[in-house]
């Protein structure tokens, strides 16, 4: 008997499986078979969620705060988000300009689905976070990629962005600090890009997922500039800042009409974020903030160790990350050899031979790099980098 056909909607073919999720699945499969895998793929803090945040969730359970909330999040949490952003960056958002979502990825999805029409162009610097391209494609938009300067740490300027703007440009996406490169956009250039986009009526989305993890400068939000609230769209998350990846709480700070559009979409998809997680998020935002600096100090130590070790491998170069917790080394010296045709094959070989999980650069729009997350212990970093060193020596 012929197998039944299961036709899938065309729009699903416009997106791919998240490369970071695939790496995690492949690594977990090897572990289940008893293989000793060093995992540099996961983009999440290895620190536990601070106890005060966990206790807030326990209190929510004890108080039976387990029912539906408003689809776009509780008023209490919206106020806490606005207060925290004001305290950190000097902004002046009101709860009506805030939406609470099921993680930072969700706010980006909602924003792009609410704003981008088929044929609209979205300008994205390369390397980019994997999800940007797919959610733009899903909306029927066109990604316009801007190459960055690897020698200068994958940075870019307003002058590099401007030639890519057109009458069809709807949105420019900036992720600073960057996933995957750790690049931080200089404040002066960020302001120039804002002036460029706002003067043309183009939205500027600032993905602030890693905004508290900067090594050489103070946290900054472009949304703090006068007049920015009209065209700047803030996409934020509690996942990295407070080691709350599994709690799934994100937020957007955007003009009120856009909040309304996104809330309409969310009301028919996820409805409200988890009630208990929202209570925990209020405590994260209003409670002690010392854990953030503790994590940052540890990430700085790991960053220095990882970059030094990578640069000690013959033929490997690595721009110094100025933020986040990723290194993005250039491994072009092994590509094209021993069946390693690209970084997808390179990542497969690293996992299969050296038992080290990394994310291939193709997922982020480049062809010579892999992403290494150093949100793991120094012991694991040392073991994994030893293996990478030996692997490169073998294949170079």
Image (tube, rainbow, N blue to C red):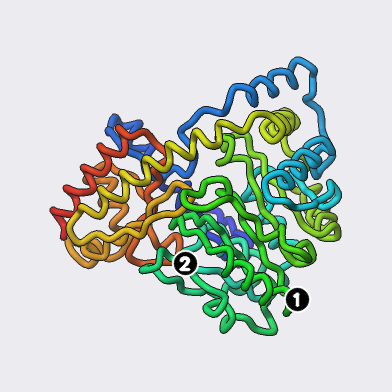
Res. 344 in view:
no
389 or 321: nearer the viewer: 321
Q: Nearer the viewer, mark 1 or mark 2?
A: 2
> Can you identify the residue that label 1 sits on?
201
Is 111 displayed left or right of 263 in the figure?
left
Q: In which quarter of the image is residue 51?
A: top right
Give how far across and how far down residue 210 sits, in percent: 55, 49
Location of residue 240 with respect to 368 vertically, above or below: above
Res. 237 in view: yes
Q: Foreground residue, 378 or 72?
A: 378
Pointer 2 residue: 155
* Residue in the image at 58% along x and 26% along y: 50
Residue at screen point 85% across, 55% down: 260
Q: How crowded is mark 2: few (under 14 residues within 10 Å), some or many (20 or more)?
A: many
Q: What element carries label 2?
A: loop
Judged left or right of residue 360, residue 160 is right
Question: How far, Cα to Cα, is label 1 from label 2?
Answer: 24 Å
């Amino acid at each position: 008997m012929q197998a039944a056909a299961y036709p899938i909607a065309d729009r699903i073919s416009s997106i791919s499986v998240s490369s970071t999720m695939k790496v995690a699945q492949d690594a977990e499969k090897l572990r289940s078979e008893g293989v000793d895998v060093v995992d540099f793929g996961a983009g999440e803090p290895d620190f536990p969620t601070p106890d005060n945040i966990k206790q807030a969730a326990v209190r929510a359970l004890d108080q039976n705060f387990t029912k539906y909330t408003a689809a776009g999040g509780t008023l209490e949490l919206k106020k806490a988000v606005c207060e925290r952003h004001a305290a950190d960056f000097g902004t002046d958002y009101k709860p009506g300009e805030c939406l609470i979502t099921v993680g930072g990825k969700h706010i980006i999805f909602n924003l792009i689905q609410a704003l981008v029409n088929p044929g609209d162009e979205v300008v994205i610097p390369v390397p980019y976070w994997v999800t940007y391209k797919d959610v733009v494609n899903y909306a029927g938009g066109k990604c316009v990629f801007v190459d960055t300067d690897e020698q200068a740490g994958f940075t870019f300027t307003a002058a590099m962005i401007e030639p890519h703007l057109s009458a069809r440009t709807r949105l420019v996406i900036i992720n600073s600090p960057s996933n995957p490169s750790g690049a931080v956009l200089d404040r002066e250039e960020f302001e120039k890009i804002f002036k460029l986009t706002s003067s043309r009526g183009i939205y500027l989305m600032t993905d602030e997922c890693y905004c508290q993890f900067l090594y050489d400068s103070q946290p900054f939000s472009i949304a703090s500039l006068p007049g920015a609230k009209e065209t700047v769209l803030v996409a934020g998350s509690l996942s990295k800042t407070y080691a709350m990846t599994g709690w799934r709480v994100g937020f957007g700070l955007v003009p009120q009409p856009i909040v309304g559009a996104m809330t309409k979409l969310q009301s028919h998809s996820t409805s409200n974020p988890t009630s208990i997680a929202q209570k925990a998020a209020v405590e994260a935002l209003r409670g002690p903030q010392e854990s953030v600096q503790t994590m940052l100090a540890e990430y700085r130590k790991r960053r220095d160790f990882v970059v030094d070790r990578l640069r000690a491998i013959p033929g490997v170069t690595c721009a110094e990350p100025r933020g986040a917790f990723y290194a993005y080394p250039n491994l072009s010296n092994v590509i094209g050899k021993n069946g390693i045709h690209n970084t997808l094959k390179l990542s497969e070989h690293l996992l299969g031979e050296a038992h080290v999980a990394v994310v291939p650069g193709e997922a982020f729009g480049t062809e010579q790099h892999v992403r290494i997350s150093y949100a793991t212990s120094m012991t694991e970093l040392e073991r994994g980098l030893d293996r990478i060193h030996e692997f490169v020596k073998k294949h170079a």
